[in-house]
Image: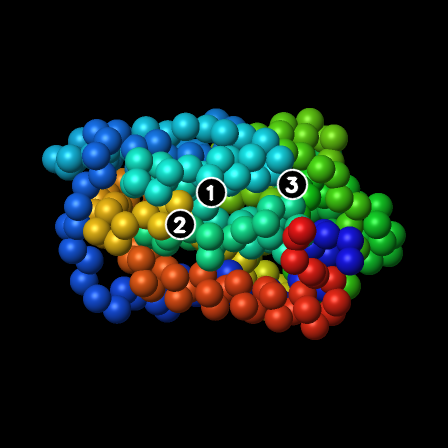
Amino acid sequence: MKKTLLRGLAVHACVLVAVAAYTPSVAQAAGQAPKCSTAKLIVPWKAGGGTQVIFAIFEKVVQKMNVESKIKLVMIPGQGGNKGAKEAAKSKPDGCTLFAIHQSAVTSYLNGRIPFHYDNFETIALLTSTPDIVGASKDVPWNNFAEFQKATLAAPGTVKVGATFGSTSQFYWLVLESKTGMKFKFVPYDGTRERMTAILSGAIDMGGLNVASGRKYLENGDLKGFAIASAERSKHLPDMPTLKELGVDMIYALQRGIVAPKGTPRDIIDYWADVFKKAAADSEFLEQMDAKGTGVDYVGPDGYREWANKMFKEHEDIAIQIGLWKKAD
C-alpha cells in the first residue's frame, strides 16, 4: 500500500469532534514537578500557525502562574509536523520535554510517515477545539457553497486545494470529497502560514481556514468563506452557514493537546496536567480563545487517553477496511 492517507479514510467524518464527551475519571492531583525549572514545549510547526499561536498564549499564562516548573515554546517545523514529533518522541522521559499534538499524529502514522502515534506518548491534557472553515480565494468566481460545489462536480480534479499532505489539513478536504462527491487537486504546503499566503495570492483556489487565521481576511473581503464545519454557527461569523445547514453531514475540528515522551513518570504527568488545567481556566486565556473561535475543553490524562484510543481505532478501522493502510517499517 502506498503510505498515503487517501480518500477512503475520508468516509469517516465525525471521529474528530467529541472532546467534550470525555471527562477525567478521577480528579487530577498536583503531582511532582520535574527537576527542570523550565520545560521545553515542542511545537512542530512554524511561528504564526494556529498551534503555535494557541500554545504561545498558554506559555504566557503559565509564566504568570506560581508553579515550580514552567514552559518555553520551541518550534521545530518541517515534514508536515513530523520533524518535531520525531524529536519529541526520542526525548528523555523526565517531564522536561512536552509536545503539542493534534490529530495529524494519527494521519501521519497511517500514512507511514512516522512509526508512532499517541500510543508512543504519555497523554497529559486535551485542551482546545477549533472548527474548520471552507475557505476560498477572493478570485474564485463562486460566491457560496452551492456554486462552488456545482463547479467542482462539473470539473473534477481541477479546483486547487492547499494542504499539508497526510495531515488533518488534507483529511478535512478528503472528508468533504466523500460527503459531496467533489474531487480536488491537492497542492502541498508545509504549514498554515504557507497555505494562507497561497490562498491570499490566488495561487490556490481553496484552503482550510478557522476563525483565528481567517476572520480578518473574510471580513475585509480578502478571502471568501462558504461554510464552517461546526455544530452551530460561529458568533464571530454569524452569516456563515454550517455545512450541516447546507446538507453536508460533516463536523470537523482540530483538537490540540499536550503529551510527553513515553515513560514519563505519572506523578510528573499529573503535575503538568494540573498546570494546564489551571491555565485553561484562566479568564484572560478563555477570552483570547473565544476571540479566536476556539473552544476550551480540558480533559485530563486518563480521559485524554480514552479519547485518543477511540479516535485512532476509528481511523484505523476505516483504513484497514478499504485496504489503504499498513504499518510503517
Marks 3 and 2, how far apart at CA: 27 Å
Relative to residue 113, is residue 302 drawn left or right? left
Density class for disc 3 (Cα within 10 Å; few <14, some 14-19, many ≥20) is: many
Q: Which residue is mark 2?
A: 262
Amino acid carrying mark 1 in the image: Ala
Task: For residue 285, say whether it is visible.
Answer: yes
Relative to residue 42, is residue 139 drawn left or right? right
Density class for disc 2 (Cα within 10 Å; few <14, some 14-19, many ≥20) is: some
Question: 222 above or below 267?
Answer: above
Contact (Cβ within 8 Å) of mark 2 with mark 1: yes
Amino acid carrying mark 2 in the image: Lys
* Foreground pick, 37 / 135: 37
Marks 3 and 1, how far apart at CA: 21 Å
Amino acid carrying mark 3 in the image: Thr
Q: Which residue is mark 3?
A: 164
Question: 64 above or below 263?
Answer: above
3 or 1: tag closer to the N-terminus: 1
Query: Which of label 3 and label 1 is nearer to you?
Result: 1
Residue 246: image location, x then y, percent: 62, 64
Residue 195: image location, x then y, percent: 63, 34
